[in-house]
Amino acid sequence: MLLTVLSLGVSSCSKSPTAPSTALGVSSISPSQGSTTGGTNISINGANFASDATVTVGGVAATDVAMQSSSVLTAVVGAATSPGAGDVVVTSGGHSVTLARAFTFVAPSGTNQPPAITGIRSIGSHPNQPSGFADQDEIVTLISTVSDAETSTSSLTTTWSGPGSFSASEPITIWRLPATVSPTPSAVTATLTVTETYVEGAVTHKNVTTAPFVMQVHDSQKEILDLGEDFLTLFSQSQISSTDVLHNFSTACDRGDGYRSEKSDTDANRTYLREDFSKFTVARLTPVLVNFGGRCPFRARLADACSQFRVHWEATYIKAVDNHKVGDHETTTGIDYVTAVLENNRWRLCHSDFDGTATNPLTGLSRHVAW
């Protein structure tokens, strides 16, 4: 009876199952060679891969590592600094395993020339808008000129990167600029990347060319209205000189005629009137019309932008002129039309034209005034 029990015990031990191995393993890589320029898609076979797996090939981290199953990983090989065989290392679950010298980097011969980016220009939403100018949150069109000696441009891969968003259909790309930039204007750079892939022997190589495109991004509405309000506010303070009043005016636009005319008006105002700045009011009338090289509605002034302000002045005559005596009071209300031009990436004022009504508060008599 004892013998029988012992016999059964031995029989039971001989049939116990062996526990499965949980060791990380790598058995093969396919393909086993690729370009030093990087970009080779590889598949790694092994055992006990997990979702946290990382891969290096020849000491360079692979990208887009994905676990297809516990025994298969896919990845994209990075670029190598020199040709030759390199180790494939998989790390997962805190462990690493190496397949020694399993992948061979092959350098291109150098006979294939990279793509050439010979030009980039932008077309904005305003008439005659200069290339390289945009307003924040504006949608512009980018047009690039690309050539390659060996590969048709339709077979090249082009991508844009930078602030904002891009919708590409080369050679034309739609770029929506950032909604806000600070300060304005600010230089915002987009980068065009052109990739050519080609085969030498059994290895696929790539050539990559990049080019920056710098956009000067403005907030034209605010910038121009700020300039116009600054000018009118300074004009309304009699102690401020005409030179300081006109510090944001261009001396070049319209051959300087706008600057000279406004200086003459400001000097005359200082000679005959003393403004009561406490009664001065100004209101911005939006929107600003941006029309590069166009004409403004009032007096057909040639300018890049046209703005309007509703203004009210109250002044006292300090020198007799026409039918006005020293001490006479006058209120003036109307619209001031201020034009602007873009010079060296800065908005500058060009002309100021006023149209309104002047009233003697004692007599109630009114007259149309324009200057």
Image (cartoon, rainbow, N blue to C red):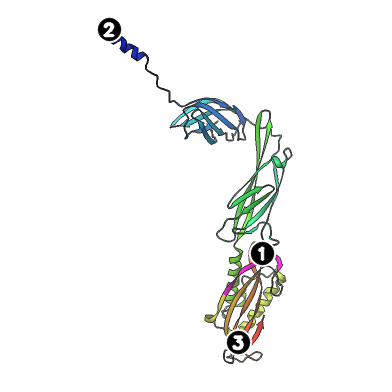
Q: Amino acid at mark 2?
A: Leu
Question: Could you tell me how far apart the alpha carbons at marks 1 and 2 are, in whole angstroms?
Answer: 109 Å
- In magenta segment, residue 286: yes
Label 1 close to label 3 by CB (< 8 Å): no
Q: Can you tell which of label 2 and label 3 is closer to the viewer? A: 2
Q: Amino acid at mark 3?
A: Thr
Q: Main secondary structure of the magenta part?
A: strand
Q: Can you tell which of label 1 and label 3 is closer to the viewer? A: 3
Q: State the residue lying farthest toward the left.
A: 2
Mark earlier in primary sequence (2, 3): 2
Q: Amino acid at mark 1?
A: Glu
Examine the image and state in which quarter residue 14 appears: top left
Q: Which residues are magenta?
A: 283-297
Q: Which residue is mark 3?
A: 359
* Residue 83 seen by the camera: no
Q: Which residue is mark 2?
A: 3
